[in-house]
Amino acid sequence: MNYKIAVIAGDGIGPEVVEETVNILNCVGDKFNHKFEYEYLLAGGCAIDEKGIPLPEETLEACKKADAVLLGAVGGPKWDNPDAKIRPEQALLGLRGGLGLFCNLRPALLYAPLKEASPLKDSIIGDGIDICVVRELTGGIYFGERGREEINGVKGAYDTERYNENEVRRIGKIAFETAMKRNKKLTSIDKANILESSRLWRKVIDELAKEYPEVEVNHMYVDNAAMQLVRNPKQFDVIVTSNMFGDILSDEASMITGSIGMLPSASLGEGKKGMYEPIHGSAPDIAGQGIANPLATILSAAMMLRYSFDLEEEAKAIEKAVVSVLEEGYRTADIMSEGNKLVGTKEIGKLVLEKILS
Ligand code: IPM
Ligand code: MG
């Protein structure tokens, strides 16, 4: 089969990690007889530099036509003026909104060979951590009305958290379905002791729970969840939460698994099209040095094969190869620990590639 992939390498380490990932996809294509076609597109800071806007129309249009989107990272200090009207991050929100990708799956998996990279004690980690964060991605405060105001001569600013029942139901449904495929345990995280939108969220999740009687559901306030994630992460299996809470908690969940450099993500909508990106950012401090960890992007490509192309065997081949390389002790700087072998972006990419071929 032929698959059309829109590739947005982006800024900072984006192009480096994407290059390794495309090599891996080509190798999977050769081995399993698929043809992946790539269209390289501009978005983020580099698009601001070349086109004056973070998400050029032709980029969004090409992504709409593609079967899936692979994204590296966007942003960097060059465009980081908080007062700027044009910012690289707008490209991400524009892509998510423009492609209708309301569901963000962020699996936080602690790979056994990386146990020593986790900042948590062995007694807390036990035999491993495997959490799937299901984050709502096109609603809530990141998409709500915002603005500046002046009341009685005092300047202010506001953002709005707003959800309707349909938005909660569609993300809730995916979370329940995900829970059914895993351990039938779902934690819905909100701030229903304060926020009206959270009370609506809770009500819809409770209604959905009746359709999934096998799933054990519990509700947790976000502040407590932030604490529980480091106190006892093993109590979590599938987490479902709003856009902002999911943004914050998924970074926390990623760190307990050792490194943000390891975690992939899939952004999905109604159809098969998805956008796949590492959850880390553009890491401008290490860009261009050949030391970035490409594994999160490589694992994102595995999610692409699984969710957009239904190529489960191929997805597993990538994931298995990554685990083997880690088991053999190869590490990029972000996950390095004593006794292991330090390698750069290209070397670890090549090692994964060789494993897939072997
Ligand atoms: C993420 C990022 C983005 C987000 C930023 C860069 C807009 O932090 O994907 O988690 O907040 O969604
Ligand atoms: Mg984030």
Image (cartoon, rainbow, N blue to C red):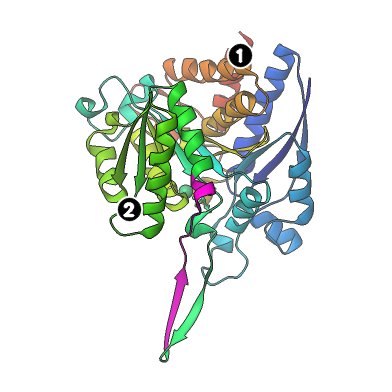
- Where's the C terminus, which quadrant? top right
Give the CA separation, mark 1 to mark 2: 40 Å
Residue 191 location (% of width, % of height): 33, 53
Q: Nearer the viewer, mark 1 or mark 2?
A: 2
In front of the other: 293 or 99: 99
Q: Is residue 310 above or below residue 156?
A: above
Q: Secondary structure at mark 1?
A: helix
Q: Is residue 76 left or right of residue 233?
A: right
Q: On the image, which quarter does residue 299 sit in?
A: top right
- At x 25%, y 44%, the residue is 227
Q: Is residue 167 magenta?
A: yes
Say if residue 34 shows up in the picture.
yes
User: Residue flagged by tag 1: what amino acid is it?
Assistant: Glu
> Under 8 Å from ligand 1: the CB of mark 2?
no
Image coords of residue 152 (percent x, y): 40, 91
Determine which residue is flagged by label 1.
313
Which residue is farthest left?
Answer: 123
The numbered dot on residue 191 is 2
Q: Nearer the viewer, residue 108 or 119?
A: 108
**Residue 76, x across and y down, in percent:** 55, 56
Q: Which range of residues does the magenta coloring cover?
A: 154-168
Q: Is residue 221 magenta?
A: no
For disc 1, the neighbor class at 10 Å (few under 14, some 14 to 19, many from 20) is few
* Disc number placed over residue 157 in the picture, else none: none
Residue 90, quarter of picture: bottom right
Residue at 47% across, 28% down:
178
Amino acid type for the residue under numbered disc 2: Lys
Q: Nearer the viewer, residue 173 or 103?
A: 173
Q: Is residue 279 visible?
A: no
Q: Residue at 76% across / 18% down in the picture?
A: 34
Quadrant occupied by the N terminus: top right
